[in-house]
């Protein structure tokens, strides 16, 4: 694409792109290090260090942070990889998988 249209082009995650936009035009303009968190169909975070997004093998998966449940809570969440991570609980609440 860069060659065809003679413009810079690249591939980035949606949350890292949003974090970069926040750093260029939004509330993080004066910052070199910050975290942009989004909650939508999932939970994500774009981590910017020294003005650049953390990506590749060290890419942050903030939605899969494990959460500590109360001892009487036996629902294990729906994440097929982690069970009770933030992402699974957000998705669970959205689809109504927990019934009183």
Image (spheres, rainbow, N blue to C red):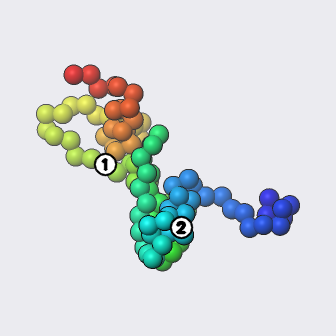
**Vertical placement of 99 versus 3: above or below?**
above
- From the viewer's perspective, is residue 43 above or below residue 59? above
Q: Quadrant of residue 33?
A: bottom left
- 86 sits left or right of 68 in the view: right
What's the residue at 21%, 22% (across, down)? 100
Please state the horizontal and vertical placement of residue 53, each as a whole percent of the image. 52, 67
- Closer to the camera: disc 1 or disc 2? 2
Q: Earlier in the sequence, mark 1 or mark 2?
A: 2
The Cα–Cα distance between marks 1 and 2, rounded to whole angstroms, is 32 Å
Residue shown at the point (18%, 33%) measured from the top left: 73
Residue closest to the far top: 99
Q: In this orientation, which residue lies closer to the viewer: 56 or 22?
A: 22
Q: Say which residue label 1 marks.
A: 66
**Percent x, y of residue 44:** 44, 51
Position of residue 23 in the picture relative to residue 74 (left or right): right
Q: Nearer the viewer, residue 20 or 49?
A: 20
Viewport quadrant of the N terminus: bottom right
Graded by Cα atoms within 10 Å as few (under 14), some (14 to 19) or many (20 or more), the crowding at tag 1 reads some
In the foreground, 68 or 5:
5
Q: Residue at x 54, y 69 (%)?
A: 24
Q: Which mark is residue 38?
A: none
Q: With respect to residue 79, does 22 lie above or below?
A: below
Q: Which residue is label 2 attached to?
A: 25
């Amino acid at each position: 694409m860069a060659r065809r249209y003679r413009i810079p082009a690249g591939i980035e995650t949606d949350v890292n792109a949003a974090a970069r936009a926040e750093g260029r035009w939004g509330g993080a303009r004066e910052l070199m290090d910050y975290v942009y968190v989004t909650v939508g169909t999932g939970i994500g975070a774009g981590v910017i260090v020294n003005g650049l997004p953390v990506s590749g093998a060290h890419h942050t998966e903030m939605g899969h942070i494990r959460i500590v449940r109360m001892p009487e809570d036996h629902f294990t969440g729906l994440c097929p990889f982690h069970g009770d991570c933030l992402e699974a609980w957000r998705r669970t609440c959205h689809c109504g998988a927990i019934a009183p």
